[in-house]
């Protein structure tokens, strides 16, 4: 009767169950790999089926058994999310962790004001996150546990001149996650905001100037560590915390004159 | 990209669309509001289920229908006192029977009682006691339900004499997933009778059960308590007193080694015959059975776990067990001391002291092995030594004597059982798993059996070996007949029988 993708529960061999949304490339793909390596059952959600299946196959081959399961879905198809969420949870037999990674950053010229691009960024980076994580929040509150992780960005800490809508989407995501944390921590739920610096993914192609670039695998391993430690907010790598602190402290009358 | 914007509005209206699909359509979404975390009694595992608490037979029938429409399986839960995953059904429907808790008929002349499945053992004994009756089989906790007790075919400290609870069930009504109710007894639907008792809820749901109580003539038991210097002494004492005792139970200090391997304390009890208790009309009052809420009249028992927790490690617990044994040795000796004790005090030790809370967040599991009498001495010594050499001694071991019974999936045999509690931590899970695997081989080698109410560690192949493939096949055939859709499942069923 039960539609189950995984084997039975074993009381002394509990399996962590995780969903990674935005799993076909970059940090998401590396996270699927890292979580499966740790023994978790992972539902990998992404739009591009081919890449997604390759990611899952890679993770399963490395783990030596089926631990990653592909689910094709476009995060901006908001109305299919509640049912897909329910189906995934049933098929992987529960849920302990959800990581929202999906994010886009199309190139934006300094004087460009393109609503379609902006709406797409807000749709994928913020509304998709809200649509997915609302479901997880509702469930985790009822089950009295679980961890919600949003991959935001250092870009969410300050509105720079370069990418108004991108900064908005990540800033909004930070606030959304903070609100979730304030709603749910009293119910035993951990909400973790991850703020990566520059990570060598597709998003970096359109970044203006980069330094301290790390690989997606390195980012994923640091994210998994932050998840294990049940951190509230974690910069990846950690030194970005200090950069961000300085940037946040620059008064606006100086910040708006800088070329940041 | 304006599609994104459109999707936002679609999502807002989407809820209605989904509801329409549900009403017209193929599959219901399980009701999120029913989702609850449910733990195994031992606290070492748990999962989330859609929990229903029907109070009538009609409502129970409706639960099956809802589950069917939602494409979910249904598991049953009584008092939730199974140590492992027997009353869990993760991400599916779980029926909690505790609201179907009416006593339907009681005849104080014959001692026959008819109850709904959610009636607890506490309700039962308190209901019949003052009429001069006591349940013939009681467990170490009175929080179990009679339905759950029948499904697991539970036993007590008199298992060699009175057998499991199934031996005292006259008949029951069983609701099949189709909604049909069948009556089962030794004469009617006998195959289902012998398989549903001890069938851990896989054939259907009990809707009423008729049991026979045991006549008693006092509210007190005559109890002997004595120290036992080793396992051989304890078993010899058991064998010597099988005929003249009503209850026999041994506590074993699992840290004892060498000559002292299996040392511990024995409690033996007998009913008082008519006239032996001059104050019987007083002692049989419910008020005389109240379990004291303080230790030595001083501090509340609820505080005990807080004081015990620092000792719940190998070193601390070794000291506690040694102290317990030595105090028994000094105060009771191997000859023992005799005293009279109310029934409830003697039986419900698990309720008197909340041991479980002392174990910490990782919880406990219990490993209970049933060994034929002739192989029991050496096998149990070996099991005790295995825990010691693996560095995971069990913290509470209990020895009981058993007899065979006619139920299909039984754990009963002519022999002994050793129940061992293991504290579970994040770090020792894999080691306990390995120890359990090795103990499985020893138990199987001795022709032993296992008990689903306690199990957390068995594997399908071990179950097939102790029950025999024929028994497993017979049970699966009965299940296919009672539940052709395969609607009833639990975590334990999926772990041990699916694909077996």
Image (cartoon, coloured by chain):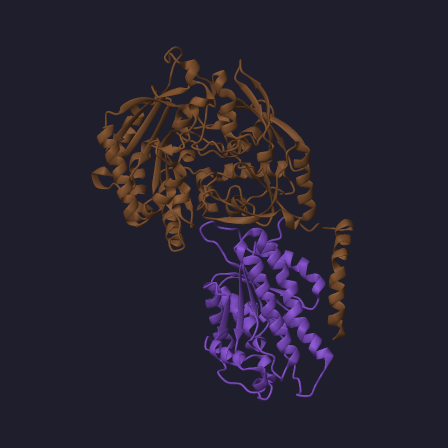
Chain colours: A purple, B brown
Residue B53 picture location, percent across and down? 62, 38
Residue B215 picture location, percent across and down? 46, 16
What is the total number of numbered labels drawn onto the structure image?
Answer: 0
Taking the image as drawn, is residue A30 in sight?
A: yes
Name the image quarter holding residue A121.
bottom right
Q: Residue sitting at 41 percent across and 43 percent down?
A: B357
Residues B337 and B382: in front is: B337
Q: Residue sitting at 53 percent across and 58 percent down?
A: A185
Left or right: where B463 falls relative to A81:
left
Residues A248 and A143: in front is: A248
Question: Does residue A252 lie above or below B29 as drawn?
Answer: below
Question: Does residue A117 lie above or below B255 as drawn?
Answer: below
Question: Does residue A37 lie above or below B173 as drawn?
Answer: below
Residue A127 picture location, percent across and down? 67, 68
Residues A196 and B83: in front is: A196
Residue A147 picture location, percent across and down? 53, 60
Placement of the N terminus of chain B among the 4 image quadrants: bottom right
Taking the image as drawn, is residue A20 in sight?
A: no
Left or right: where B477 falls relative to B273:
right
């Amino acid at each position: 009767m039960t539609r189950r993708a995984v084997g039975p529960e074993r009381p002394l061999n509990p399996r962590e169950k995780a969903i990674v949304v935005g799993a076909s490339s970059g940090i998401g793909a590396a996270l699927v790999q890292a979580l499966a390596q740790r023994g978790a059952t992972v539902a990998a959600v992404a739009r591009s089926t081919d890449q997604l299946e390759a990611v899952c196959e890679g993770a399963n081959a490395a783990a030596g058994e089926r631990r990653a399961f592909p689910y094709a879905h476009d995060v901006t198809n908001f109305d299919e999310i509640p049912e897909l969420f329910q189906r995934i949870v049933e098929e992987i037999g529960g849920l302990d962790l959800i990581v929202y990674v999906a994010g886009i950053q199309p190139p934006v010229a300094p004087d460009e004001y393109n609503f379609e691009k902006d709406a797409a960024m807000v749709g994928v980076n913020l509304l998709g996150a809200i649509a997915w994580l609302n479901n997880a929040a509702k469930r985790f509150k009822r089950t009295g546990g679980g961890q919600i992780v949003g991959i935001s960005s250092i870009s969410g800490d300050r509105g720079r001149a370069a990418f108004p809508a991108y900064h908005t989407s990540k800033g909004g995501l930070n606030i959304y996650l903070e609100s979730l944390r304030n709603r749910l921590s009293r119910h035993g739920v951990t909400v973790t905001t991850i703020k990566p610096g520059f990570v060598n993914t597709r998003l970096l192609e359109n970044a203006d100037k980069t330094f301290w670039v790390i690989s997606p695998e390195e980012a994923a391993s640091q994210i998994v560590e932050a998840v294990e430690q049940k951190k509230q907010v974690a910069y990846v790598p950690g030194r970005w915390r200090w950069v961000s602190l300085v940037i946040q402290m620059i008064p606006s009358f100086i910040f708006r004159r800088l070329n940041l | 990209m304006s599609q994104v914007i459109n999707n936002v509005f679609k999502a807002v209206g989407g809820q209605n669309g989904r509801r329409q699909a549900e009403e017209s359509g193929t599959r219901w979404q399980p009701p999120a509001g029913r989702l609850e975390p449910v733990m195994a009694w031992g606290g070492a595992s748990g999962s989330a289920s859609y929990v229903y608490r029907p109070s009538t037979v009609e409502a129970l029938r409706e639960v099956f229908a809802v589950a069917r429409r939602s494409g979910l399986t249904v598991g049953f839960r009584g008092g939730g006192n199974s140590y492992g995953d027997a009353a869990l059904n993760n991400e599916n429907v779980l029926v909690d029977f505790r609201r179907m808790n009416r006593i339907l008929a009681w005849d104080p002349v014959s001692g026959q009682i008819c109850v709904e499945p959610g009636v607890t053992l506490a309700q039962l004994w308190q209901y019949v006691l003052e009429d001069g009756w006591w349940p013939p089989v009681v467990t170490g906790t009175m929080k179990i339900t009679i339905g759950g007790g029948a499904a697991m075919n539970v036993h007590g400290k008199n298992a060699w004499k009175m057998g499991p609870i199934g031996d005292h069930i006259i008949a029951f009504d069983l609701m099949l997933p189709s909604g049909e109710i069948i009556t089962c007894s030794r004469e009617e639907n006998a195959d289902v009778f012998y398989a549903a008792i001890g069938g851990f809820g896989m054939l259907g749901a009990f809707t009423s059960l008729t049991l026979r109580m045991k006549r008693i003539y006092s509210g007190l038991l005559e109890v002997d308590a004595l120290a036992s210097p080793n396992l051989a002494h304890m078993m010899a004492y058991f064998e010597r007193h099988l005929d003249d005792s009503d209850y026999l139970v041994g506590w074993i200090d699992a840290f004892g080694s060498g000559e002292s391997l299996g040392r511990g304390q024995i409690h033996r009890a007998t009913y008082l015959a008519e006239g032996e208790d001059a104050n019987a009309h007083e002692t049989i009052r419910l008020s005389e059975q109240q379990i004291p809420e303080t230790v030595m009249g001083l501090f509340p028992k609820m505080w005990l776990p807080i004081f015990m927790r620092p000792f719940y490690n190998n070193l601390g617990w070794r000291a506690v067990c040694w102290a317990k044994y030595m105090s028994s040795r000094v105060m009771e000796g191997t000859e023992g001391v005799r005293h009279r004790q109310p029934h409830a005090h003697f039986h419900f030790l698990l309720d008197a002291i909340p041991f479980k809370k002392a174990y910490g967040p990782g919880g406990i599991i219990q490993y209970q092995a049933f060994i034929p009498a002739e192989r029991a001495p050496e096998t149990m010594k070996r099991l005790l030594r295995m825990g010691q050499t693996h560095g995971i001694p069990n913290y509470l071991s209990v020895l009981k004597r058993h007899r065979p019974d006619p139920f299909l999936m039984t754990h009963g045999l002519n022999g002994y059982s050793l129940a061992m509690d293991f504290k579970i931590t994040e770090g020792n899970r894999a080691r306990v798993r390995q120890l359990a695997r090795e103990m499985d081989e020893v138990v199987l080698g001795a022709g032993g059996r296992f008990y689903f109410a306690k199990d957390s560690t068995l594997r399908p192949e071990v179950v097939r070996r102790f029950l025999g493939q024929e028994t497993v096949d017979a049970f699966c055939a009965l299940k296919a007949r009672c539940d052709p859709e395969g609607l009833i499942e639990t975590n334990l069923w999926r772990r041990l029988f699916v694909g077996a």
